[in-house]
Image: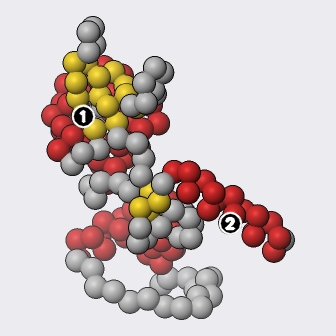
Amino acid sequence: MARMDYDPSSRVSFGCPDELLETLDEIADREDKNRSEKLRELVRNEIEAKGDLHESQPILPDDERLADAYRMLHQRASAPHKTELRVTLEAAKNKLYDNVTPKSAVLDEIIKPLESINYASVSSGNEVVWVYVRPMRYTDGEDIVEPEEKQSRKSVSFRLFSRIL
């Protein structure tokens, strides 16, 4: 019998395939939690990951794996002598390979798909192959927000929040 040590203000009901619920229950059991506790944790994590809904959000690929890869490439890329963000193909492979995608498959399974949706491009330089990374773009939910505008909105929000406190 599940314990009722949580006093919810709302209840949610939704349909879910049996196999997903069975897996969720197994994960919850391993963590010594019940299904409701695990679901609340997952919802909380998702909300934290998406950030403040009033703050502009990055425009990312729909595929979660590609979105994570784009974020990593964007963080790793630099523009030392040009305005374009870039990282060597070798550095990109080193950053993006994992147990699911071996280093030898990074180009075909991650970088080329990002290239096909215009988040990155690959080009040979004089001595190395470069991965050019598209600058991060943001949306306020309806329109694309320029990085400078995003920063000014953030500072306005902070000033308003500071006045409230």
Of callouts 1 and 2, the N-terminal one: 1
Where in the figure is residue 92, as x and y percent of width and height?
33, 27
Q: Secondary structure at mark 2?
A: helix
Give the camera-side residue of 158 and 1.
158
Q: Is residue 42 visible?
A: no
Quadrant of residue 101 in the image? Answer: top left
122 left or right of 135 in image: left
Image coordinates for residue 76, horizontal then vertical, percent: 44, 31
Query: What label does residue 121 carry, if any?
Result: 1
**In the displayed structure, would residue 105 be above or below residue 5?**
above
Q: Residue at x 51, y 51 (%)?
A: 147
Residue 15 sits above or below residue 104 on the image = below
Find numbered disc 1 in the image and state the secondary structure of the residue it sits on.
Answer: strand
Give the residue pinned by disc 2.
157
Q: Residues within 10 Å of mark 2 (few under 14, many from 20)?
A: some
Q: CA distance from mark 1 to mark 2?
A: 35 Å
Q: Identify which residue is drawn at 23% across, 71% down.
A: 19
Describe the colour scheme in one phrase.
secondary structure
Is 4 placed left or right of 21 in the picture?
Answer: right
Three-letter residue code for mark 2? Ser
Q: Position of residue 17 (x, y in %)?
A: 22, 77
Above or below, 147 against 164 in this view is above
Picture quarter with the C terminus: bottom right
Q: Residue at x 30, y 66 (%)?
A: 23
Please, which residue is most extreme toward the top here?
127
